[in-house]
Each structure stands twice: as C-alpha cells, then as structure tokens.
Amino acid sequence: MINRHTAQTVLIGGLLVLILPGIPPAHADETGRPENLRLELVLDVSGSMREPDLDGQTRMAVAQRAFNEVVDAVPDGTDLGIRVLGATYPGDDKTIGCQDTQQIVPVGPVDRDQAKTAIASLRPTGFTPIGLALRAAADDLGVGETARRIVLITDGEDTCAPPDPCDVARELAAQGTRLIVDTLGLTLDDKVRQQLVCIAGATGGTYSSAQSADQLADRINQLVDRAQDTYTQTPELVTGSGDCAAAPVLAAGVYVDRERFSEHRWYRVAVQPGEELRASVSIALDRPVNRDYGVLLRAVHPDGRELVRGTDADSGRTDVLSTGLRWSAAEPGNDDEDRPEPADMCLVVSNSFAAPGGAGDAPGLPVELTVDLVAATPTPDAPGLGRGWLLLVVLGVAGLLTGLAAGWLTRWWGSIWKENAR
C-alpha cells in the first residue's frame, strides 16, 4: 500500500509553471470564486477484469482498492465523477453490450462515502465500449474556461468500434472543449498500449501502465495530482525537430510532446527586446528505465552558442524529472543586448534515458514544456551592486580601512606594552 503523503505530492511537471507569471488564472464565476477542477475517472469493468494478473488478485479487486485510496486522496475543491463501462450487461448480444456505460457518481464535490459504496458494488461483466464511454464522459464534464480531465483505466482495447476510441479522442480535441484524457493500461499488450497512447496523444494527455496494486494506486494518484496542478491551461500538442533551423516556433504557453531515449528535441521562441524567457520541462517516466538518467534543458542561439542551461527542480517524486531556466537579452554579457529586433532563441530538451533489458523506447516519454515571456528583470539601481564592479570597490575600501585600523591598534597596544615593561 502506498504512503498517503507520497500519493499527494504535487507534480513537478507543473512545479515551475506555478511560479511563472503569465499563466491565466482559473475562471471565476459571478461570485468571484474560482472554478473547481472537474475530473472524471472512467473504469473498465468488462469481463476481462476478472483475470488475476495483478498481485494474484483479480484486476477488478485491485482497481477497487486503488480507487478507494484515490477517493481518500482527492483534494477538497475538486469536482469528481466516476463512469464505468461494461458493468451491467452479461449477455452475448454485442448491440446491447456495446451501449453498456453508466455514470455511477455524478461530477460534483467529492462525496467519499458515496464514491466508495458505488465502487464496492462493481463486478466484471461485459463488453469494452471505450469510445462510447469517452463521449459520455466528455458530456458529464461539460464545458468551461478551464481544462476538464478524464482518467481512463482499462485492461483491454475497445471491443465495440465503431466508434473507434482514437477517433473519438481526436473528435473531442477538435471541438476545442479543453478536454484532456490520461490513459492507464493494466496490461503490457502492445495493441492496448498503442490504442491508449493514441487516445492520450490526441488530447494532450499522457499514457502510463501499472503492473502491481501499488503501481496502480500510485499512478492514479499521480494523474489526479497532475490534473490538480495544470487544469487552468490546456497543453498544446507540438512536435519538436532535430535541429534549431526546423524547430516549431512557440509562444507563451504549455506544450506536450514525446521524446525517445537519448533524443534531443528543438523548439524556437522569439524573445522581444526587454523580455525575459522563462522555461521549464518535465518528463514523466511512464515505463521502467535504468537508474542513471537525467533531463537537460538549454537555451541556444541559432548560431550554436549555448546561452544558459537549466537547473534541476527536485519535486520529491521519482516518476517525473523537471528542470527550468531563465534568460534575458538585457543581462550584461549578452551579445544581443542592444539589438532592436527580437531574438529567435532555441530551447533544446535532451535526456539520457535507457531502458533495462533492451526494452523499446516507442512511443517516446511524455514531455511537458512550459514557455513564458515576461518583462526582463532590471539590474538593481541601489545600492548598485548588480554590475559587480562596485562591490569590488566597496570590499577593497573596507579591506583598506580594516588594515589601517588593525595597524593603528597594533601600534597602540605595542606602545602600552613597552610602557608597562619599564
């Protein structure tokens, strides 16, 4: 069983986002209160959930235990709903079975007793209409100024297409409803993984897998935490290039991409005169990796000069690595300080990951990149130590005065000692 405090640790992926100005606040209603995060958990209760794959228990028993932990850990101020698929029809009529999805907890303020009671009654039953369930979950969450999030947990691929769940995800993304779907697979089946990766990728979400009871509870909690941290802005899908010249140009915002092991992905940002670039990147470890690894974020001039590299951000979590940087053209020493035109800087995201046992690196690891452009931080006017030279002068004068005072005291003490010696 995972530690409750660990499960509630805040995502790093959004760690630096929270301290960067320029991110729009959560929408407030007419009373001035911020809009709650709206989140729905969608659980597969199809017949395959009877399989005893996780820790010798049925997948359903493990999912129920994990859901109870998640319900306890969901922060107050979250509107939570739960929808199931394949939970009620035990027959073989596919026409009926592929309509089998129900919302067992309506989206609203967390009622932990109601949610746990509803979860306890679930029994693996029927088909797997994932596409239909995603459409229904989107309707459950409604629309608003902030992103809505779905966490889909399943052990199999859709058995009812059409509608194909990947097409449904693209359809929902195209509607501009700010809906993000994170997917969590309970098997290592390649077809299931490909489908879940497609669903998540189409909506700016992430895919991860769980192969034990502890992993399952931990992964769901991490997704809930991630939703809590980033729901005020929907990430935009972007594909980084292999060099600076071909890199996509990014404005201020939050972006998601995927990066293979030991890959370098390039992005361009136009920094106006007087602006400061602030950027952060988080990479989620959604699969096992070797122990020696790291993530690097650099700002590079188009001519190849490295301007600054990021500083690691320790979130206390082992499933996400983050780093961030700041760069301003107005800082002393920058060759472009007096230029009248914007500077196209390139951000480079690199990693040193490798998989144990020769496991493949496709699809790439989820990358969340945050870009912000703010007014450049001015050099302090007083006491005027920002440039460094005045500090040296002050220290030199202080040293001289200290030396003179020490010499005078030494002579004075020496004269007193000689008088007493007589």
Image (cartoon, grey):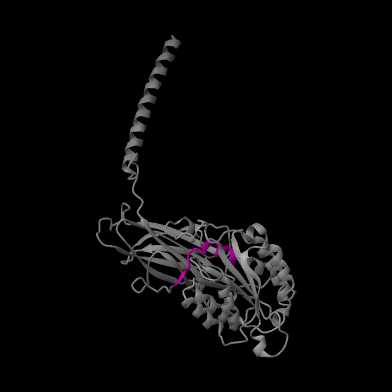
Q: Quadrant of residue 68?
A: bottom right
Residue 269 or 253: which is nearer the viewer? 253
Considering every residue shown, the one lying at the far top of the view is 422
Q: Quadrant of residue 339?
A: bottom left
Q: In the picture shown, does residue 375 fall above or below 400? A: below
Percent position (x, y) of residue 137?
A: 58, 75
Q: Is residue 25 visible?
A: yes
Verify whether residue 209 appears in magenta.
Answer: no
Q: Quadrant of residue 159?
A: bottom right
The N terminus sits in image quarter: bottom right
Q: In the picture shown, does residue 382 fall above or below 196? A: above
The C terminus sits in image quarter: top left
167 displayed left or right of 47: left
Percent position (x, y) of residue 274?
A: 31, 55
Q: In the picture shown, does residue 157 fall above or below 337? A: below
Residue at position x 40%, y 70% in the image: 266
Residue 243 or 133: which is nearer the viewer? 133
- The magenta stretch is 223-237
Percent position (x, y) of residue 83?
A: 64, 74
369 displayed left or right of 69: left
Residue 186 or 354: which is nearer the viewer? 186
195 displayed left or right of 47: left
Residue 362 or 219: which is nearer the viewer? 219
Verify whether residue 230 appears in magenta.
Answer: yes
Percent position (x, y) of residue 224?
A: 59, 65
Q: Is residue 1 visible?
A: no
Number of marks drawn: 0
